[in-house]
Image: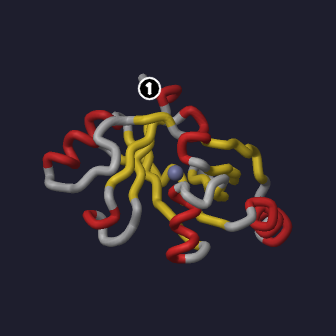
Amino acid sequence: MKITHIEHIGIAVKSIDEAISFYEEVLGLRCYAIEEVKDQKVKTAFFKVGETKIELLESTDPEGPIGKFIEKKGEGMHHLAFAVDNLTDALLKIEEKGITLIDKSPRKGAEGLYIGFLHPKSTFGVLTELCEDPGKKD
Ligand code: ZN
């Protein structure tokens, strides 16, 4: 497995509209996409910073993963996502090393990426996501 770059940093927010204003008006970035990911019960907004993106996450359901996260820990950094060249292979190799996975096989995430999460208990407290862009396959 090979990590190519930090794909995105996920940030949990209570109000995506208020957070977008901060990123656009204060930091001068431009939101280029807003997307609802129904099975994760979130609305997402994306900003590009070089090759890396900022992904804002607003819960659409208090029982969803982001709703629960904000209730427990408040707003803030939620996860770190690395781009890998082959996600299926990466998840297998990582599991072989004794790391607990949340996703044992790739599933669909925002922006048409395939994603898989590693459990923060195994990753020093940082919820870690691996992504593969199927459009970037050679
Ligand atoms: Zn993510």
Ligand 1 lies under 8 Å from the Cβ of mark 1? no
Where residue 60 appears, as percent x and y from the top left, is 66, 53
**Residue position marked by numbered label 1 in the rendering:** 137
On the rendered image, what quadrant is the C terminus found in? top left
On the rendered image, what quadrant is the N terminus found in? top left
Residue ID at (54%, 54%): 8
Where residue 113 appears, as percent x and y from the top left, is 51, 36
Where residue 63 appears, as percent x and y from the top left, is 55, 58
Q: Secondary structure at mark 1?
A: loop
Residue ID at (48%, 28%): 134
Residue ID at (39%, 67%): 126
Q: Most extreme residue toward the top, as rendered? A: 138
Q: Image check: 133 left or right of 20?
A: left
Q: Is residue 10 visible?
A: no
Q: Amino acid under label 1?
A: Lys
Q: Image check: 62 left or right of 121?
A: right
In the foreground, 67 or 47: 67
Q: Quadrant of residue 55?
A: bottom right
- Up-down relation of residue 75 to residue 114 (above or below): below
Q: Most extreme residue toward the bottom, as rendered? A: 73
In the foreground, 27 or 118: 118
Residue ID at (66%, 50%): 44
Estimate how packed mark 1 is, as few (under 14), some (14 to 19) or many (20 or more) residues with alpha carbons within 10 Å. few
Q: Most extreme residue toward the front, as rendered? A: 63
Q: Is residue 14 visible?
A: yes
In the foreground, 106 or 86: 106
Where residue 77 appears, as percent x and y from the top left, is 54, 69
